[in-house]
Amino acid sequence: MSRAKPESLLTLTQTFFQSHLQRTRGASPHTVRAYRDAVKLFFLFLAKHKRKPVADLSLDDIQSDAVLSFLEHVESHRGNTPATRNCRLAAIRCFVQHLLRQDMRRAGQYGRILAIQNKKTTRRTTLYLEPEEVQALIGAVDRRLPNGDRDHALLLFLYNTGARVSEALALRASDIRLERPRQVRLLGKGRKERICPLWPETAAALRRIIRTANNGATLFKNANGTALTRDGVAYLLDKYVQRASDRLPSLRKRHVTPHMLRHSCAAALLQAGVDVSVIRDYLGHVSVATTSRYISTNLQMKRQVLEAFWRRAGLAPNSPRSWRPSPKLLAFLETL
């Protein structure tokens, strides 16, 4: 009786991406690409470190010291941030967990890799637009121009629903209900569905582009009639930010990304007093901790909390006067 041939690194890599990530976990194409890039970089580094072609790498080469050397290389030679280093590690961890499930003989080897810790990083402040800035951005769209209706509907939809750009670009007419209750069905990470309500204005904007859409096709298309891409959405945002900055100069220094509109939706919901757990479901977050980060970065809410505390402490004057610098003070500052 012949013994079963042990799995190779190539075979397990193929099953990780084709079976585990895509079919079992339902990972988005964006996640698959990110993990692919991380694993590819690791294999290239490992091949150079071992002085042999990538095709000759084996499961025995996947060691913790090699992973640690790769992570150091990512930061010191590629100039990546600790946050990027942690993202690369997360992808390798996920890959090694798959190896462990399929190859228990090397459990100790894989366990040492899974024990590698993330590097502590400073969490970036979550950036968002205030409602008046979003109004100026949407108001910069000229619907009389070609694709004006599409751009108007897209910006309204992203802000209304807080959808990820991938969710918006996958939108089809069959996902939308334009009669009351107006709503949209979104397919998020891990192929999890959620329902979001639509404003009447958003529903009206979507109705205008649905009239010209092919049945069953995605709604947001480029000038060639094919599906709009992430880069296409980023280009449109840049264009309308420039136009809106004429009306609202504060936008000139802002780098507005599609995901910033998602943050802006969350911030506006918080300012409106919506509970964090409700916002979690609205945005499709797995954990409420992800949603709670918006509280720590929302300056408007901090101002309101400070003013309420000030009043409660009895320190606020009955008729506070706004501070104005004296001419002497201004003259002094000019000498500096």
Image (cartoon, helix red, strand yellow):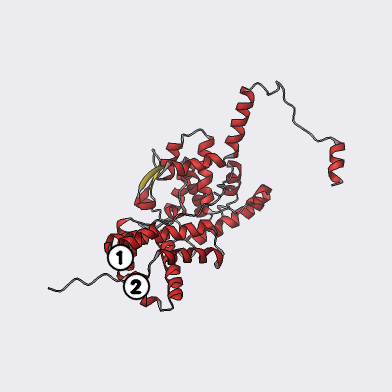
The secondary structure type at the circle numbered 2 is: loop
Name the foreground residue: 167 vs 59.
59
Give residue 130's position: percent from left, percent from top: 59, 42
C-alpha distance separating marks 1 and 2 = 16 Å
| Residue underneath mark 2 | 58
Left or right, residue 202 beside residue 215: right
* Residue type at tag 1: Thr
For the point 49% across and 42% down, the residue is 201
Q: Is residue 12 above or below residue 294?
A: below
Residue 39 seen in the current view = yes
Identity, as a three-letter code, of the amino acid under mark 2: Ser
Q: Residue furthest bottom?
A: 52
Are the residues at dot 1 and dot 2 in contact (C-beta closer than 8 Å)?
no
319 to the left or right of 106? right
Whether 56 is drawn above or below 262: the answer is below
Residue at the spot 48% in from the left edge and 40% down from the top edge: 292
| Residue bearing mark 1 | 15
